[in-house]
Image: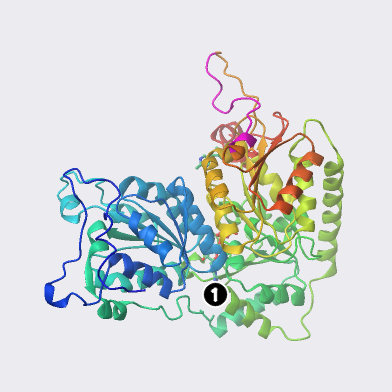
Amino acid sequence: MFRKADSYHKCRPVGDLDAPDGDNTETFPLSSDNESRELTDGFHLLVDALKLNGIETIFTLPGIPITDLTRLAQAQGMRVISFRHEQHAGNAAAAAGYLTQKPGICLTVSAPGFLNGLTALANATTNCFPMILISGSSEREIVDLQQGDYEEMDQLAIAKPLCKAAYRVLHAQDIGIGIARAIRSALSGRPGGVYLDLPAKLFAQTMEAEAGRKSLVKVVDPAPRQIPAPEAVRRALAVLKGAKRPLILLGKGAAYAQADAEIRALIEKTGIPYLPMSMAKGLLPDTHAQSASAARSYVLAEADVVMLIGARLNWLLSHGKGKTWGAPNAKQFIQIDISPTEMDSNVPIAAPLVGDVGSCVSALLAGIEAGWAKPPTDWTAAIAERKDKNLTKMAETLAKNPSPMNFHSALGAIREIVKERPDIIVVNEGANTLDFARSIVDMYEPRKRLDVGTWGIMGIGMGFSVAAAVTTGKPVIAIEGDSAFGFSGMEVETICRYNLPVCVVVFNNNGVYKGTDVNPRGGDAAPTVFVKNARYELLMQAFGGVGVLAKTPDELSRAIKEALASGKPTLINAIIDETAGTESGRITNLNPQSAAKKK
Ligand code: ADP
Ligand code: TPW
């Protein structure tokens, strides 16, 4: 952990580029009479502070001033996963945070590296995933006077509005408290992204090792349980009891909370039908009798009481109002959320239950006496009828085998594989590829589905896949639109370098949404189309992985099975009919031109 202040920086430059004016080698300022005094420095304190708090992995891209930090972290036994672009390191950190309930760490260089990581930090905050973006920064004195330092930027000011909290550490003795504050901010209450600004000078600062050791902080109970008030529990139970057509809506906050057994018990004991939001799929198996996914429109419109568990009434739920939700003001909402200000954000919440999902659900369970009446059968039977009808329709569609493949036939093959291997993690992005996969590929276990989340952001694919493989050791299937894949495609090299069991399936329909647009004036290609018949599989082969071209569901299925059996990085170029799909998938209505048409 700590070492005699002798060798580390004497034998290697602090930076990884030669300083413009020559030697940039630094030595510790030891006086002759304390040659054996034990010292530590910013580099070591940072690694020690993270390890002390059980953080074992760093997602990064090296450069001045953090190169040595990445080397030291690895030398000290941390897993250091080095990416080709900071956004993907940041996305990996965010997904790791979501999967493990420990903040994922993304470490970047200053200005441009920091900015590349910032999208991921903002996205993590939007998704309520805990992560910490740690960026090296330039000399404060020069930045503040805007004198033009190497990669000069006031990073702290820029990060602040885009994350939950932002801190800067100026002195080595404050590293311990800085890391502690970052961890607690990321994890407590509503989880989110935290920015930690570390000026280059800090890393080489030395202090007495013993004082350094004492300055470190092991955070006690970083995400304290938040117990709901008893009267709030009683109110929620009363509203639930009065319901004739109750519905439970599970969101990714419920999945994050890891209260899987309690949630399942609540749903099964009450007998209430439930709908999982995209990343809550698998919290209970999608094949569960009470799942109302296949009757989604019906239950949203008809339910009279809706209990939200870790889900916001944002655009993904039409803000809790409008046509989707049936007759105006005909519903009562119960909402379980750790963030008090989430209540009444879009519509009035009749019974707010502020607390962590585990505590709130346990409190509700405790209040449900043995004689709890299950929902009226006319409600559950009406749902079952619609479900059956829609599932039969889906089965008919999946049974077709068109040539070329369409989204359904390709996803039908993946659906069967996930059914056989429910421990696989599915990463999913694109437009049609996302929307169809969400409804076709059933999930069976909690936190096995990672996708574009609250923003519907493209580019999470390879970063999330790397994080999923690294943090769980489980195989990953990344179901990617060809446009979506392009945002992080270079990270296939990262996947090969760490030999991760990731199988990327590119749904290749020659463009964004589809590949059929034509420029009416001739000349340049239309903005949404790509090079036709692109050979994405060769990208994986370039780095020693397996690349396969699949034109039929059988070929696709065989290639995925081989990837799962071998554990080798694999990319399958799945050729999809370029006329299949719709503009923007299922959110066509959000396109300005369709809004204008409606007027
Ligand atoms: P989805 O997109 O799946 O509908 P959202 O991201 O909109 O889900 O909502 C997640 C919600 O869960 C957020 O409002 C967040 O505050 C909440 N949340 C996150 N973790 C917890 C937790 N441990 N307990 C209670 N609520 C939580
Ligand atoms: C960071 C806008 C939404 S979906 C999409 C884009 C560019 C790609 C759709 O094409 P793809 O999928 O992936 O080939 P498919 O199945 O329909 O063929 N930039 C960012 N985020 C978003 N959401 C966009 C642009 C977008």
Residue 482: give x, y in percent of width and height.
61, 36
Q: Residue at x 45, y 48 (%)?
A: 87
In the shown orientation, is residue 66 left or right of residue 123? Answer: left
Ligand 2's quadrant is top right
Is 304 left or right of 234, judged from the image as shown?
A: right
SS type, badge 1: loop
Residue at (56%, 51%) from the top-left corner? 315
Image x and y of residue 590, in percent: 57, 40
Quarter-of-image position of residue 241:
bottom right
Badge 1: residue crowd in 10 Å (few <14, some 14–19, many ≥20):
many
Residue 218, horizontal then vertical, whole percent: 39, 78
Q: Nearer the viewer, residue 556 or 293?
A: 556
Please tell me in which quadrant of the rendered image residue 12 appears.
bottom left
Callout 1: CB less than 8 Å from ligand 1: yes
The correct choice, above or below, for 35 with respect to 592 in the image is below
Q: In the rendered structure, which amino acid carries the disc numbered 1?
A: Asp
Residue 294: percent from left, percent from top:
77, 54
Does residue 174 show up? yes
Task: Decide whether residue 296 is among the magenta residues.
Answer: no
Q: Which residue is mark 1?
A: 356
Residue 114 vs residue 21, the one in the foreground:
21
- For the question of whether residue 242 can be seen, the reply is no
| Magenta segment boundaries in residue numbering | 523-539
